[in-house]
Amino acid sequence: MTPLRTATVVVVSLLTALLAACGAKDELPKVTAQAPTTVTPFVPSPLVVTGLEYAFGIEGQAAPGIQTITFKNA
């Protein structure tokens, strides 16, 4: 490595380290979150799946937990 190339690598490394050290912790945004006071329970609606030939149609929305699923063969 030539002396000029070595000096360039050293200068760039020092500048990078200096710029990284300039960030202050006070610049980060302060996040304050409050828990919701009321919780609305999720009531799953029945899920109806209709099968026709090689296609399926779904009525309703899948939900976590136990749910009633009805399959109709059309």
Image (tube, rainbow, N blue to C red):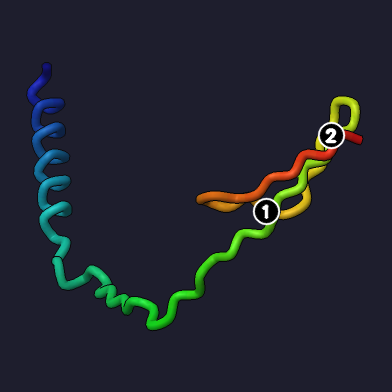
Q: Which residue is mark 1?
A: 61
Tell whether 50 sits left or right of 6.
right
Q: Position of residue 2 (x, y in %)?
A: 11, 19
Mark 2 is on which residue type? Gly
Image marks 2 and 1: residues in contact by CB distance under 8 Å: no
Residue beneath the point at 15% across and 34% down? 8
Mark 1 is on which residue type? Gln
* Quarter of the figure that contains the C terminus: top right
Could you tell me which secondary element the residue under label 2 belongs to? strand
Could you tell me which secondary element the residue under label 1 belongs to? loop
Tell whether 14 sits left or right of 27.
left
Q: Position of residue 10 (x, y in %)?
A: 9, 35
* Quarter of the figure that contains the N terminus: top left
Q: Position of residue 25 (x, y in %)?
A: 14, 66
23, above or below 58, in the image: below
Q: Mark number for residue 49?
A: none
Q: Which residue is mark 2?
A: 51
Query: Residue 69's quadrant in the figure?
Result: top right
Tell whether 21 sits left or right of 74.
left
Query: Residue 19's quadrant in the figure?
Result: bottom left
Residue beneath the point at 50% across and 74% down? 40
Compute the Cα span from label 2 to label 1: 17 Å
Residue beneath the point at 32% across and 79% down? 34
Residue beneath the point at 12% across and 27% down? 4
